[in-house]
């Protein structure tokens, strides 16, 4: 009797079919978990930017704003510390492009920015709170900032 090495074509085909079925079943779960994780990560970045804007307002004794536009978020501070022609605000830190980084959409409700005065209190939007919605596909999360500048949700 001769010694047989390796797999037959039928054994390889059966193994390939089993692995393909497992991937077919698991892909939607993995895809939705990635989307939820991207929304959560994007929310964390926005909350950290809000905290940085609030802290920068109190430390530098200037008004700061978290601006959101075109799925990008950044912090502005006024007045400028060093005068530059054509600009009246400093950009603090980097401009976060949340769409290219996480594939998420970021929108502010009825305003384009959330501001903080030098005391760290919220200012610059109508009403007593501002909200930011982060979404990707069917998943979304809302960040609410109260009039005192605190993230409440």
Image (cartoon, helix red, strand yellow):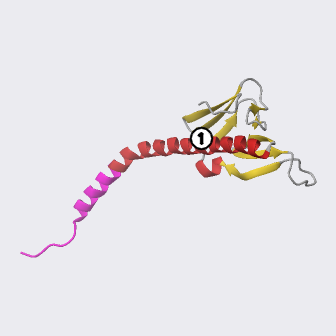
Q: Residue 52 in the image: x percent, y percent?
A: 68, 45
Is 120 placed left or right of 9 in the picture? right
Q: Does any portion of residue 113 appear in the rendered image? A: no
Is 54 placed left or right of 90 in the picture? left
The C terminus, quarter of image: top right
Q: Residue 140 in the image: x percent, y percent?
A: 57, 35
Residue drawn at x 58%, y 43% as measured from the top left: 44
Predominant secondary structure, magenta span = helix
Residue drawn at x 54%, y 41% as measured from the top left: 40
Q: How many marks?
A: 1
Residue drawn at x 64%, y 47% as measured from the top left: 99
Residue sticking out furthest to the right? 85
116 in magenta: no
Residue corresponding to mark 1: 43
Q: Residue 102 in the image: x percent, y percent?
A: 59, 48
Residue sticking out furthest to the bottom? 2
Q: Which residues are magenta?
A: 1-21
- Residue in front for this viewpoint, 42 or 77: 77
Query: Quadrant location of residue 120?
Result: top right
The N terminus, quarter of image: bottom left
Q: Residue 135 in the image: x percent, y percent?
A: 60, 38
Name the element at disc 1: helix
Residue sticking out furthest to the top? 127
Is 40 placed left or right of 113 in the picture? left
Residue drawn at x 47%, y 41% as measured from the top left: 32
Q: Does any portion of residue 19 appear in the rendered image? A: yes
């Amino acid at each position: 009797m001769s010694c047989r090495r390796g797999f037959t074509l039928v054994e390889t085909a059966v193994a390939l079919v089993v692995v393909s079925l497992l991937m077919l079943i698991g892909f939607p779960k993995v895809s939705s978990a990635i989307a939820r994780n991207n929304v959560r990560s994007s929310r964390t970045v926005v909350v950290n930017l809000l905290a940085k804007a609030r802290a920068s307002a109190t430390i530098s004794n200037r008004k700061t704003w978290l601006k959101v536009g075109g799925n990008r978020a950044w912090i502005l501070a006024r007045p400028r510390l060093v005068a530059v022609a054509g600009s009246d605000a400093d950009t603090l830190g980097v401009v976060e492009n949340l769409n290219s980084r996480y594939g998420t959409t970021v929108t502010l409700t009825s305003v384009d920015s959330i501001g903080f005065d030098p005391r760290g209190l919220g200012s610059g939007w109508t009403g007593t709170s501002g909200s930011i919605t982060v979404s990707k596909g069917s998943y979304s999360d809302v960040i609410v900032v109260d009039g005192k500048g605190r993230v409440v949700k």
